[in-house]
Image: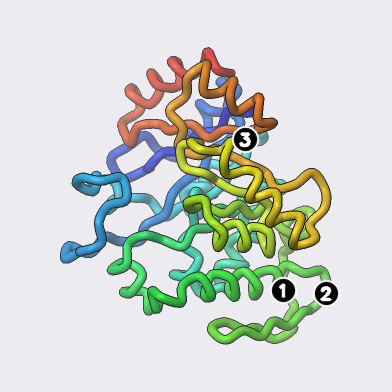
Amino acid sequence: MRIATTVFLTDQTITPVRLAQELEQRGFAGLYLPEHTHIPVERTTPYPAGGELPPEYGRTLEPFSALAQAAAVTERITLGTGITLVAQHDPIDLAKQVATLDHLSGGRFTLGVGYGWNREEAEDHGVDWGSRRRAVRERIGVMRALWAEEPTAYEGRTASVRASYAYPKPVGGAPRVLFGGAAGPRLFAAIAEHGDGWLPIGGGGLTEALPALRAAWEEAGRGGEGPQIVPYAVRPSAGKLARFADLGIGEVVVQLPPAGEPEVLRTLDAYAEFL
């Protein structure tokens, strides 16, 4: 099983370069970074995990810049977002960022897609909260059109692009696209329509959820080996990883603390038993 990592990198934590170097040297599989552009002080949206919002959410590094640094000092580890708030981006710019990072890293990039939970943050970007799922779907449509080998147009209600020359292309035609979010028909339909798999936070409840996701995948006429399942932000244990292996899961993303280099390296030492 591949053991990748995620962490809230900030201006106060270990740097992307040092973390990426340590991950590669120690045999970890990859690095996924989250995204928040800002956290409005006057916020009524509750923190999904409950309690006070941790301070690192308002200090998070911009993930594509941080991952570009990580790519430059490594050759093997995969690089990804966990997740990108797609509705908050211009899709033409985002398509170029994704394609460039994937190209420069030799095809190592995974685009994690999320709908967001912080209404105030999204609204500052001009996102209509009630229609953000449509916005994400259509922005992905624009990106896939720009990644296509031949100039391809896409027309949506909220996002469109003319048939265009757009290089570089992602290695292999398109990066892997994994959706974050809670289990449910809408998410599973989105994955089956234009994703490659799911990033379930914590990995709980998979035994019950996976049959519904696989049914949605088959209904959409998707073939191959089915959707990729990558449990995300996991606090690992031997029993938990064994359960994931029994479900046929080949990659798990474990959570690192948003801390300085000494604490992060101690956590990597503790996780080494799972490699």
Residue 2 position in % (x across, y down): 63, 28
| Horizontal side of residue 56 vs 112, given as left or right | left
Query: Between disc 3 and disc 2, whose residue precedes?
Result: 3
Is 198 or 57 nearer to us in this picture?
198
Tag 3, which secondary structure? Answer: loop
Is residue 244 placed above or below 102 in the rendered structure? above
Residue 228 image-quadrant placement: top right
Disc 1 versus disc 3: nearer the observer: 1
Q: Is residue 110 at all visible to an observer of this figure? A: yes
Q: Which residue is drawn at the image coordinates 67% and 63% (left, top)? A: 194
Q: Which residue is drawn at the image coordinates 59% and 48% (left, top)? A: 198
Residue 32 position in % (x across, y down): 51, 43
Q: Which residue is drawn at the image coordinates 30% and 50% (left, top)? A: 57
Task: Name the residue that disc number 1 marks.
Answer: 145
Is 155 or 11 nearer to us in this picture?
155
Q: Residues within 10 Å of mark 3 (few under 14, many from 20)?
A: many
Q: CA distance from mark 1 to mark 2?
A: 9 Å
In this picture the colour scheme is rainbow
The circle on residue 77 is 3
Q: CA distance from mark 3 to mark 2?
A: 30 Å
Image quadrant in which the C terminus is located: top right
Q: Is residue 73 at all visible to an observer of this figure? A: no
Question: What amino acid does circle 3 point to?
Answer: Ile
Is 200 or 107 nearer to us in this picture?
200
Task: Name the residue that disc number 2 marks.
Answer: 150
Query: Between disc 1 and disc 3, whose residue precedes?
Result: 3
Is residue 105 placed above or below 256 in the rendered structure? below
Question: What amino acid does circle 1 point to?
Answer: Ala
Tag 2, which secondary structure? Answer: loop
Q: Residues within 10 Å of mark 2 (few under 14, many from 20)?
A: few
